[in-house]
Image (cartoon, helix red, strand yellow):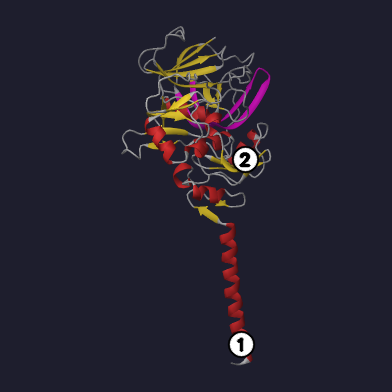
Amino acid sequence: MTWRNRRRWGAVLLLLLTGVLARVALGQEGSRFFESTGHTLDNRYGFLAFWEAHNGAELLGAPLTPIVFEGNIPMQYFERGRLEARAGGVVPGELGRERTRWRSFERLPATAPRGEGRFFAETGHTLSGPFLRFWQEHNGELMFGPPISEPLWEMVDGASLRVQYFTRARLEHHPALPPGQDVRVSALGREAALARALITPEQKPAVLVSQAVTADGMMAAFAQLAPTPTPVPPTPTPVPPTPAPRPTVAAAPLPPSAPQRSGKLIDVDLSRQQLVAYEDGQVVFSAPVATGKDGFNTPTGTYQIYAKLPLQTMRGNLGGESWVVPNVPHVMYFTGSVALHGAYWHNYFGTGVRLSHGCVNLPLDAAAWLYNWAPIGTTVVVHP
């Protein structure tokens, strides 16, 4: 072999060795790219290993964000959950508790009948039937935590389903599916990522946000992530599209204790800063709200939703104040320029702090649920 050939073969061997070493290094670190969301899952904090070891495809879904930091805790959001790198290792985030932070579930006494179910003394709730089987089959102690509610009916993607909340998740029962496939994990990870402005209201994958997200920084982060709105000439108040003729409405609000017995109704209690949704006289949903501040008080009365917009830039100049709020999500007008809508710029829902210009502000996940549930024509009762 000539000197020139030896040099050529040496270069080839060097390239092959470099490739092998690169593949070994990649295998040690580990990474997986998800085309569906445009994000990567890796082992910098052990998230990929945890995802693969605990049926992540079914229980967590695809990643929606890169790794973000809340305080000093590295975490990553998925469609159905959140992983956190804690001192003791990787654990799922407590999205069930966060999702129900404004709700309270009555604890059952330890002597409550439980049949073939299991009672959790630490939370005062039971687990039975399909939910218990799914919990047992999928390492529920780690992945879901103990139940924090009894099974209850809620609207999920337009369907009334039996659900149960756990510290780290919500499980849904889909009776139309075959046994063994009839329980699914709710998309609370997507809701939480949306509420923290890590993804847009259109449910698109998140843009890179590597810094900690705080309440004070949410408005700027959301405006940066959302699409640039089409310029709109300033107007005194937000102007919805020309509504269809409104149905006749009652002159006075219905008493909150006696909601209509058929159809859908939204009750807004100004003194409690609470919204309750009824369907055929039964409570199907509740959420805390923040209503109009003094001088911009939310009007009381009985109204009906007459226009809906999935996203709107709100502009106004009234009472010596001017405002431009881009990309307000899930807007539902029920009287004049007053609407129910999501608010990403504060977290004072249900606290008694009233800071809107008359609209009823809702947490982002609650606004999304209500928008999907309430059609045009739904009655809205606002009372002191």
Q: Viewed as shown, does residue 68 lie left or right of 245?
A: right
Q: Quadrant of residue 295?
A: top right
**380 to 94, vertically: above or below:** above
Q: Which mark is residue 6?
A: 1
Regarding residue 364, the answer to whether it shows in the image is: no
Region rendered in magenta: 307-333
At label 2, the amino acid type is Gln
Q: State the residue in front, 259 or 43.
A: 43
Q: Position of residue 116 (x, y in %)?
A: 37, 28
Measured from the top left, where is residue 341 in percent x and y? 53, 26
Q: Is residue 361 above or below residue 168?
A: above
Principal secondary structure, stretch drawn in magenta: strand
Viewer-nearest residue: 113 or 179: 113
Provide the residue designation for mark 2: 224
- Residue 155 — which label? none
Q: Is residue 121 shown left or right of residue 160?
A: right
Question: Are dots 1 and 2 in contact, CB under 8 Å?
Answer: no
Residue 92 seen: yes
Please check the rendered image and state whether residue 330 is part of the magenta-colored stretch, yes or no. yes
Label 2: state its secondary structure.
helix
In terms of depth relative to the viewer, which is nearer, 306 or 157? 157
Residue in view at x 48 percent, y 18 percent = 109
* Badge 1 amino acid: Arg
- Give above or below for 99 relative to 113: below
- Give how far across and how far down residue 32 sits, in percent: 53, 54
**Helix, strand, or loop for circle 1?**
helix
Q: Position of residue 241 (x, y in %)?
A: 47, 27
Left or right for 185, reference 344: left
Residue positioned 62% across, 19% down in the render: 351
Between the C-alphas of marks 1 and 2, the distance is: 57 Å
